Amino acid sequence: MPDDTNSVDQHNGSGEEMQIKNESAAEPSDMDLMKEKFSKLLLGEDMSGGGKGVSSALALSNAITNLAASVFGEQSRLEPMSATRKERWKKEIEWLVSITDYIVEFVPSQQKTKDGSNMEIMVTQQRRDLLLSIPALRKLDTMLLGILDNFEGEQEFKYVSRDADESQRGVQRSDKWWLPTVKVPPSGLSEESRRFLQKQQEAVNQVLKASMAINSQALSDMDIPESYIESLPKNGRESLGESLYRSITDEHFDPLQFLSALDLPSEHKILDLKNRIEACVVIWRRKMIHKDAKSSWGPAISLEKREIFEDRAQTVLLLLKQKFPGIPQSSLEISKIQCNQDVGLSILESYSRVLESLANTVMSRIKDVLYANSHAESHSEDSTPSLRLSSAAESTASLTLSDFISWDSEPSEAETGKRCSKDEEEKIIRELATIKRFSYIDKVEMGGIRSPARG
């Protein structure tokens, strides 16, 4: 007789094996995920295969941007990323950035021959801009995730839904209604907790400034598209408008006073100002290149004065970037990213941009807590003058350039002590002149770009 017991065991065993195979098939491996991601990149996001996709550079830029949006989303709280999201980010961003390992250039090197003599040969090395910036971006990435990890465990502040009772609700300094409010102890945060927050704020500020610098440099290395050139007016006065043009070309120009006198109530106004100034800088640069007065881009005023005006406009752009780090991309930046063909620059720009965005969000969440603490201290009868002086001294010690050039229409009590004197403002302006400006228009080519038709 056949052994029914063995046949049943074999049947159960095969069933378990099939179940394991089905489960493994349901969860794609890293190799399968990587194949799918890179196949989409090679198709230029055109899944039909009809050749209507975008360039490889833009496809990579979109891939990094979309990955960051799906992993980070809106960082509404100061808390560590979940292990699953963190693992996905590290794995997939490494896949995309690893492409830069194969973007190389030839460099001279010494090779020793059999007879002992040295011979110069050419070897391949990762392109210099990538060799310098990619490790820096990886370090900034690690630092930023580490800062979020520092908020693990119990904190003196907590987040409360906006739908909570009035007695339980916290404070929110921004008008973002979807964010939870911050609640701190009635007498404010302890000395230790304030020091911890200020230390994290300084660390995030360093990440923010470094990622902004790398992003600006990558944008400046991209060529200005011909389509953007064709859309420009013929002179800077028309681009800026009469009022802005007179202010920038005035004999006595103060960039801080210039910006403080402007009405910038919304993000739209700020972006419009940036677009106007960037277009004006491109126009002035081209007029300095096309020195022939017969050219349609020929100069109407001396090159020396135009160079001074262009330098002033660049200073204003730098101050705008410092004051509003979370401002959307300008028309010039969008045009460059969409038309860029350099894969290396595309990865540098998109990677630094998503790190800059996350750093700016984390900085904003820290400021939310500090604002709630300031609000609690101002309404607490237990706050002592010594603690207030200590807090003010620490705040002044950790000021950055972006803090000095803040000009809110209604400054809070916590920000009143951050104002600087006229002598300090002039010193800052002199320091600005020594900072390397990451110009967006360093790649205006001498030829190959057709001048726009007269309009």
Image (cartoon, rainbow, N blue to C red):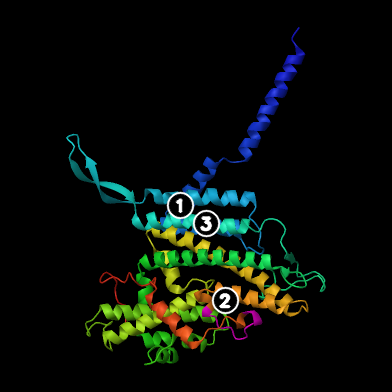
Instruction: Give the percent coordinates (x, y) of residue 188.
Output: 73, 72
Crowding at dot 1, Cα within 10 Å, few <14 / some 14-19 / many 20+, comes out as some
Which of marks 1 and 2 precedes in the sequence? 1
**Span shown in magenta:** 404-414
| Amino acid at the residue labelled 2 | Thr
* Residue drawn at x 37%, y 75% as measured from the top left: 434
Find out whether the residues at labels 1 and 3 contact each other: C-beta distance under 8 Å.
no
Which residue is disc 1 drawn over?
Answer: 97
Q: Nearer the viewer, residue 26 or 359?
A: 359
Q: Nearer the viewer, mark 2 or mark 1?
A: 2
Which residue is disc 3 drawn over?
Answer: 141
| Amino acid at the residue labelled 3 | Asp
* Figure check: 279 above or below 37: below
Q: Quadrant of residue 433?
A: bottom left
Instruction: Give the percent coordinates (x, y) of residue 177.
Output: 70, 72
Q: Residue 410 lies in magenta, yes or no?
A: yes
Q: Nearer the viewer, mark 1 or mark 3?
A: 3
Tell me the tag on residue 396.
2
Residues under labels 3 and 2: Cα distance? 28 Å
* Figure check: 353 above or below 10: below
